[in-house]
Image (cartoon, rainbow, N blue to C red):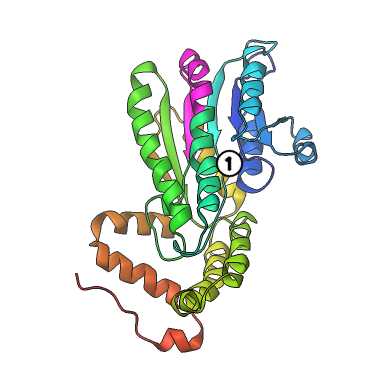
Amino acid sequence: MTKSSETQELVVVTGASTGMGAATAREMARCGFHVLAGVRRDSDGRALLADGIEPVILDITDPNHITALVDRIDSDAQGRPVRALVNNAGLPMAGPVEMIPLDQWRRLFEVNVFGHIALTQALVPALVRSAGRIVNISSLNGKVSMAGYGAYAGSKFALEAVSDALRNELAPHGVQVVVVEPGGVRTEMAGLGLTTLSRLSAGMTSEQSARYADLMQAIPSHVAAFTKAGVSAETAARTIAKAATVRRPRARYTIGAMTAFLIRASRLLPDRVLDRMTTSDLRKHYPDRARRAPAVHPAS
């Protein structure tokens, strides 16, 4: 049921220009909340206006944008409380650990970790006043890392750890913290992470090419297959909305059967066995020559 404008609570969704963030903003609006949807450009926000969503220019790495959002909430004409903060904004990235320049690592962590922390710090007072909720969008890669995805996984592992601490720190003050772990989601975001690969390939030395050429050729196909087998942005958004609104939320929600399986496997299987599983899946996308060569794993 849609709430009247007098009783609507506020929900902040970051990274709402497209994909899962936009779908989540629309789903939360359908649930009756007044959604403040973080977008990077005015043109991104225009598509959300028709759904009764209020777009706000928000780069979570820009302190001025965060201050403006807090001011918007504090000066809300109806004094509406903040029901939830959905930290969805993020950058993808793929490539071998050795190959990704440190400035790109720093940019990735600025968005995927420090930006979320900065916005969360700014909104905690409002969330405590309203006994609200924080929903952090992590990933399968927040629990399972593999060759070619170390940078992205590292940022999501960090977000998981921060979320665990926040959950325990804020629970006594009435704020619940929930993590959502999507796997493949059919949006354009996964493909954006591949833009670094061509630049990395162009800069490889002969030794690096010998080490990583097959892996780097495999990653686009692997990402495409995983994304194709994933869920729609709208399906993911329904799980996120549940995490944000259900009376007694779980600490974590997974999205997708394969995601749930792999995360469970990561808890139960020895590391070397999990290594073989993930490497075997990745090698299906290697060039034929490399695919026929046996994978080498250190002894357990």
Q: Position of residue 168 (x, y in %)?
A: 32, 27
The magenta span reads 120-136
Q: Position of residue 13 (x, y in %)?
A: 60, 34
Which residue has dot 1 on it? 89
Quarter of the C terminus within the rendering = bottom left
Element at label 1? loop
Front-most of 49 and 298? 298
Q: Compared with residue 2, is residue 285 higher up or lower down, i.e. above or below?
A: below
- Can residue 1 be seen here? The reply is no
- Residue at figure coordinates x 30%, y 65% from the top left: 274
* Amino acid found under the numbered disc labelled 1: Ala
Which secondary structure is most common in the magenta stretch? Answer: helix
Q: Is residue 110 left or right of residue 261?
A: right
- Can residue 165 be seen here? The reply is yes
Quarter of the N terminus within the rendering = top right
Q: Compared with residue 86, is residue 107 higher up or lower down, i.e. above or below?
A: below
